[in-house]
Image (cartoon, grey):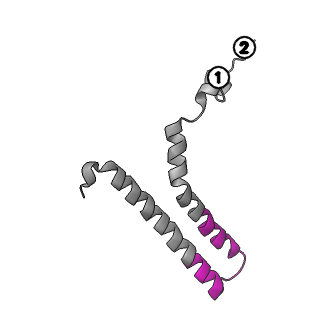
């Protein structure tokens, strides 16, 4: 007869001390514009999965791609400006 044992990580995976820290929540908040822009881009692509993209669809995809890239650039610029002490470039 074999004994069934639980894995400790699986049992404590949702314990209170496993909550995200304030720093992790702040990082999520900073990255949220990028996540939302990527969702918009995916939505634009999903609309065209079952048909040939029209000119309007192509414009929507281009706009969504530009917004996603702009959000990523803005996130990188904020991260760079925060990491450089004294405003050095």
At 51% from the left and 45% from the top, the residue drawn is 26
Q: Residue 31: percent from the left, percent from the top?
A: 51, 53
Q: Residue furthest right?
A: 1
Distance in Å between CA atoms under marks 1 and 2: 13 Å
Could you say which is closer to the camera, residue 74 or residue 59? 74
Q: Is 20 inside the magenta-drawn segment?
A: no
At 50% from the left and 46% from the top, the residue drawn is 27
Q: Is the C terminus in the top left, top right, bottom left or bottom right quadrant? A: bottom left
**In which quarter of the view is residue 9 placed?**
top right
Vertical comparison of 18 with 87: above or below? above
Q: Magenta stretch: dominant SS?
A: helix
Q: Residue furthest bottom?
A: 55
Q: Residue furthest front?
A: 86
Q: Which residue is mark 1?
A: 7
Q: Which residue is mark 2?
A: 3
Vertical comparison of 47 with 24: above or below? below
Q: Residue 3: percent from the left, percent from the top?
A: 72, 13
């Amino acid at each position: 007869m074999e004994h069934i044992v639980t894995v400790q990580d699986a049992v404590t995976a949702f314990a209170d001390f496993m909550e995200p820290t304030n720093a992790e929540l702040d990082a999520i908040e900073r990255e949220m514009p990028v996540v939302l822009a990527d969702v918009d881009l995916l939505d634009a692509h999903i609309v065209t999965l079952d048909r040939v993209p029209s000119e309007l669809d192509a414009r929507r995809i281009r706009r969504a791609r530009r917004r996603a890239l702009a959000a990523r650039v803005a996130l990188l610029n904020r991260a760079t400006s925060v990491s450089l002490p004294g405003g050095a470039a």
